Amino acid sequence: MNVVDSSGWIEFFQAGANGPIFKPVIEDRAHLLVPTISLFEVHRVLSRKLPSELVTACLDAMRLGTVLDLSERRAIVAAETAARHKLALADAAMYSMALEHGASLWTQDAGYQGLPSVRYFAKA
C-alpha cells in the first residue's frame, strides 16, 4: 500500500521534475490510500493557480484511490505521531495513516526524511 503526500500530488499534477517518480504510485489505484487532509492541501494549493474545473478534476483523480477519513481515533494517533516526530498536523496525520496500513509514504517534504516507511525524494 502507498500514500502520496500532498507535495507528491502537487508535483504530479503540475508536471514538475519529480512528477514521473510519483506517477506509477498514483496510477496503482488498487494500492493507493488518500488521506482526506491531502485533498484539503492539494485543493488549497492548486486553487491558487488553476481554474476550479481543473482543481475538481485533480481531486476526482485523487478519489480514485481509497480515501481515508481523519476519524477521532486517527486524530489521537496523529497527535502522538506529531509529538514523537515533531511533525505538523497534516504531516502527522498522513504519516500515521500510512503506518496504520503498513503503507509507504511517498513525499518531497524534507520533514519526513529519515522516518521509517518513507520514500523521500528531494525537490528537483
Image (cartoon, helix red, strand yellow):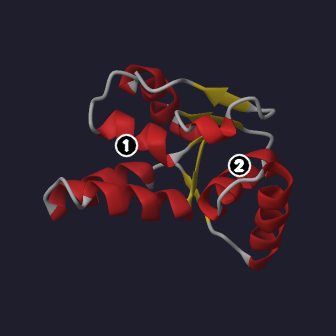
- Front residue of 47/100: it is 47
Q: Name the residue: 45% across, 32% down.
A: 27
Q: Name the residue: 13% across, 59% down.
A: 51
Which corner quadrant holds the C terminus? top left
The crowding category of the residue bearing disc 2, from other C-alpha atoms within 10 Å (few below 14, some 14 to 19, many at least 20), is many
Q: For mark 1, what is the residue?
A: 10
Q: For mark 2, what is the residue?
A: 95
Q: Residue furthest front?
A: 86
Distance in Å between CA atoms under marks 2 and 1:
17 Å
Using the rendered view, name the quadrant where residue 1 is placed. Answer: top right
Using the rendered view, name the quadrant where residue 48 is placed. Answer: bottom left
- Front residue of 25/8: it is 8
Using the rendered view, name the quadrant where residue 121 is placed. Answer: top right
Above or below, 24 relative to 9: above
Among the two numbered marks 2 and 1 on one chain, the one whose residue lies closer to the N terminus: 1
Residue 106 position, x and y percent, is: 59, 34
Tell whether 44 sits left or right of 67: left
Residue 12 position, x and y percent, is: 36, 34
Q: Secondary structure at mark 2?
A: helix
